[in-house]
Image (cartoon, coloured by chain):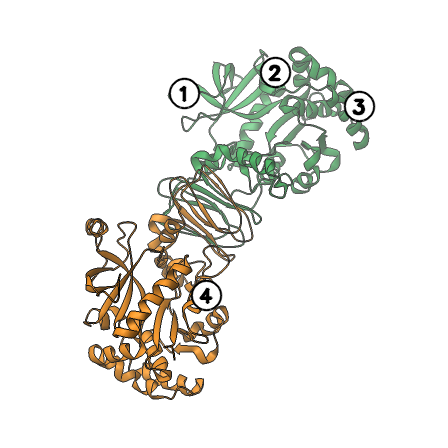
Chain colours: A green, B orange
Amino acid sequence: MAIPIHAVVLAGGAGTRFWPLSREARPKPLLRVAGAGSLLADAVARARRVASPGCVWLVCGREHVEVVRREAGIAKSRTLVEPAMRNTAAAIGLAAARIAAESPQAVMVVLPADHRVPRAGAFAAAVRKAARAASREGALVTLGVRPTRAETGYGYIRLGDAAGASHPGLHRVARFVEKPDATTAERFLASGDHLWNSGMFVWRAGSLLAELAQHAPEIARALAPVAALPAKAGSRAVGDAITRAYRRMPKAPIDTAVLERSANVWCLPVSFPWSDVGTWASLAQELGVNGAASSVIAGTAFTFDAPGNLIAAGDRPIVLLGVRGVAVIDAGDALLIANLERSGDVRNVVASLRKRGRRDLL
Amino acid sequence: MAIPIHAVVLAGGAGTRFWPLSREARPKPLLRVAGAGSLLADAVARARRVASPGCVWLVCGREHVEVVRREAGIAKSRTLVEPAMRNTAAAIGLAAARIAAESPQAVMVVLPADHRVPRAGAFAAAVRKAARAASREGALVTLGVRPTRAETGYGYIRLGDAAGASHPGLHRVARFVEKPDATTAERFLASGDHLWNSGMFVWRAGSLLAELAQHAPEIARALAPVAALPAKAGSRAVGDAITRAYRRMPKAPIDTAVLERSANVWCLPVSFPWSDVGTWASLAQELGVNGAASSVIAGTAFTFDAPGNLIAAGDRPIVLLGVRGVAVIDAGDALLIANLERSGDVRNVVASLRKRGRRDLL
């Protein structure tokens, strides 16, 4: 019998930097950036390409569960609702606990719901390759994206030795590197052995639980009762167990809780286009906005001598004249015009609107 | 019996440079720029301050007569409808013809409906002073605005000799000067004897008709049948006479047709704030937009490190982040974001939308 592959779509983020399209009631994974689907719908489609039938899971926060589950089209029995955000170690560990309850040998693929990976076929091929290594060797396989620019907004993975003849292309990880400064990012780009840490992972559910027990015992202890519930346990029972587990769940990213500590971390370098869609500026870059071109991601826009802009029109056409380097985002009930170089500060705008009592705009 | 003063509000302009607030169906005089009233409503209010009771006239084009007359609140019998735009000599001559039919001695004050004159009291005092000179001396009195900057967008009036002891403050006009280049404008500003030609005039209706007969005989001949109709003639009869008159009416500005040729042109220098509201940029300047401040002329806006902008919000709040020197104009069915330095090109935008068949946006 083939080892089943489960895919876990992480849909936890709120994404205030994508205000006004991302809102309290419409978190970032629901963002439509190009083409027909939302980031979440695209992530679920990628998940279905690699997962065994019926093996796509959704992890999301309680406040967005209805809208996220509807958009994802995932059954209640495959939806794991976090009562509070406890970062990725908890969310991924939770999914591992439930997948292991069904099949400890199962391979699980972790996909953030708010990334953009336009070439789904290349993604699926990489995942299948990583899944073989994860299944046979018990490795924790990270997907490392070959950098196409000296990006300072991502963490990096430094490749170590090749994993060996039976897994061509895979490497051991020498170390994880924090977001670099511009000079360091240039060096990384030139080096050829530094890859973007994509947050996409492939491993056996049982391997991750074992690594959590070793490197993050508090998380493992909190999750133990969830893992102990039988595979056939009902949603209510699982939900109650999660609620209890999260009362004692520490906050930690999977990188620091496990990956930077484990000796079994591998990396599969990949070359397909990938973006974590961090800000309006990174989305603009991703969509090819530059000194000569603007990008219209929704609605109708007319530009006159106005390149370098990212435009999301709503119910009314937007005309740009002689304006460069801005994001113009019409959400219907609010309109943002932001210098793209300042788009990291959009979250401060949201904080300020909250302070001013404009809850209607959050 | 006192000489009656008539006030003529010229509401002919379309104002495509104020797209998208100015539209084919909502010409520029209907623009609301600050406070409660439109430019037109404010102009009518100024007219009522200086005119004898019932002596405010409206001159406007056929295509806008309904909306303009409603906004102005002027009776049909005081509304002169131009079948086609024939520039200011025709429009002013037409009003003079009908006013003279009532009272050739009447003084008429000409007020463009699309200017901004926030200090109505100072305006009225100046008009009364000019009206005395116009009435007693038969002079054509122009109001010349003392420049506050080296403006290249206005024509200038060069002051000549003082008009004499009985009319202190008034001067003869040495000459009219076309829009200057920047260096010349600086010189004009420094000279102290060059004033902005405001397009606001005060003269006896009979004086203007006589000057037209002398300097623009074609216009005078075209208007003669309109002037010959009795004061009590009905709107229908007047309208028919105007239609016939305009079939042979040449196009000419009052400046070149009469003022630059007549020996009886005086100027009253005035110091109250005045603007012809020519572009979004000039409106912004007028409203005090600068490197430290934005101006919100409608709706709700939040600015974050975004000075130097002119904002007209509609039904949705507008947030600006790190953006400078732009006009953001939400008209409900279209939104313009224009570099203020390019706002003279808005008319080209309108022309382009027309070419693209977007009549819904014109």
Residue B215 location in percent, x, y? 20, 77
Nearer to us in this view, B257 or A138: B257
Give left or right: position of B127 versus A200.
left
> Which of marks 3 and 2 precedes in the sequence?
3
Amino acid type at mark 4: Ala
Distance from label 4 to label 3 (Cα)?
Answer: 80 Å
Report which residue position mark 3 lands on.
A229
Distance from label 2 to label 3 (Cα)?
Answer: 24 Å
Amino acid type at mark 1: Gly
> Which of marks 1 and 3 precedes in the sequence?
1
Q: Quadrant of the N terminus of chain A?
A: top right
Report which residue position mark 2 lands on.
A258
Q: Chain of mark 3?
A: A
- Mark 4, mark 1: which one is toward the viewer? 4
Q: Chain of mark 1?
A: A
Report which residue position mark 1 lands on.
A192
Residue A133 location in percent, x, y? 58, 20
Q: Is residue B195 above or below residue B27?
A: above
- Mark 2, mark 3: which one is toward the viewer? 2
Query: Does mark 1 fall on the same chain as mark 4?
Result: no
Nearer to us in this view, A16 or B292: B292
> Which of marks 2 and 1 precedes in the sequence?
1
Give left or right: position of A30 versus A318.
right
Report which residue position mark 4 lands on.
B45
